[in-house]
Amino acid sequence: MENNPEKTKAINRSDNVRRIAIGADHGSYDSKEILKLYLQSLGYLVIDVGTNNSTVKVDYPDFAVEVSKKVTTDQCDRGIMLDAAGIGSSMVCNKVPGIRAALCWNEKTIINSREHNNANVLTLGTSQHNAGELCTMVKLWLETRFEGGRHWPRINKMMAVEKMRSFYGT
């Protein structure tokens, strides 16, 4: 990740992001534990929804739902969900009304997910990144502010899709 002074203007200095929900499947347990300690060292309150064991096979959807529920019920300000690729977790989280989960893999996607899409859950594929990269990405995501302005109409349209479910009979 580059350290570009032009991009630091997006760093979150005024939002009150303190409580972070984090979850992972068994394959991403070690990464979750590293991220949890890292976030705590930065002063975040981390709510770990599991898994709490790297040797017992579990299903990531169970933990993705729990992370999402912590965010939608305002128990946490944001959520982070980890699995090997991050794809499945993103799909599950986005089924929960009120969640805007973003699967990110580099600095540009992280900044875009926050500045343009106001993502409230970050999903990451832990098999794609080392621990240092994961820490850097999570910190950047938590510190990047939503720009608002011209992006609000799109966010409103995105969230209106949830209300369309009754239109389709679901």
Image (spheres, rainbow, N blue to C red):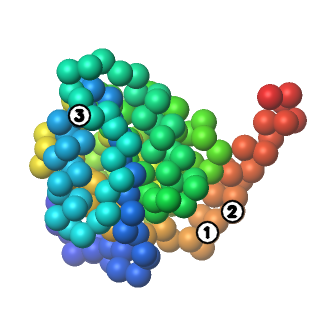
Q: Residue at x 78, y 45 (%)?
A: 163
Task: Please provide percent x and percent y for residue 77.
Answer: 46, 62
- Crowding at dot 3, Cα within 10 Å, few <14 / some 14-19 / many 20+, comes out as many
Relative to residue 5, is residue 9 drawn left or right? right
User: Contact, CB < 8 Å: mark 1 with mark 3?
Assistant: no
User: Contact, CB < 8 Å: mark 3 with mark 2?
Assistant: no
Identify whether 51 is placed above or below 8.
above
Mark closer to the chain start, 1 or 3: 3
User: Contact, CB < 8 Å: mark 1 with mark 2?
Assistant: yes
Query: Which amino acid does the dot numbered 3 rest on?
Result: Tyr
Q: From the viewer's perspective, is the residue at label 3 or at label 2 nearer?
A: 3
Is residue 115 among what the camera can see? yes
Task: Please provide percent x and percent y for residue 7.
Answer: 29, 70
Task: Please provide percent x and percent y for residue 100.
Answer: 54, 49
Per the rendering, the mark at residue 29 is: 3
- Crowding at dot 2, Cα within 10 Å, few <14 / some 14-19 / many 20+, comes out as few
Query: Which amino acid does the dot numbered 2 rest on?
Result: Pro
Q: Residue at x 24, y 70 (%)?
A: 43
Alpha carbon distance from label 1 to label 3 = 38 Å
Relative to residue 145, is residue 158 drawn left or right? right
- Residue that sits furthest to the bottom in the current view: 14
Is residue 111 among what the camera can see? no
Mark closer to the chain start, 3 or 2: 3
Q: Residue at x 64, y 65 (%)?
A: 152
Q: Quadrant of the C terminus?
A: top right
The image quadrant that residue 74 belongs to is bottom right
Per the rendering, the mark at residue 150 is: 1
Query: Which amino acid does the dot numbered 1 rest on?
Result: Arg
Q: Nearer the viewer, residue 137 or 121?
A: 121
Secondary structure beneath dot 2 equals helix
Per the rendering, the mark at residue 153 is: 2
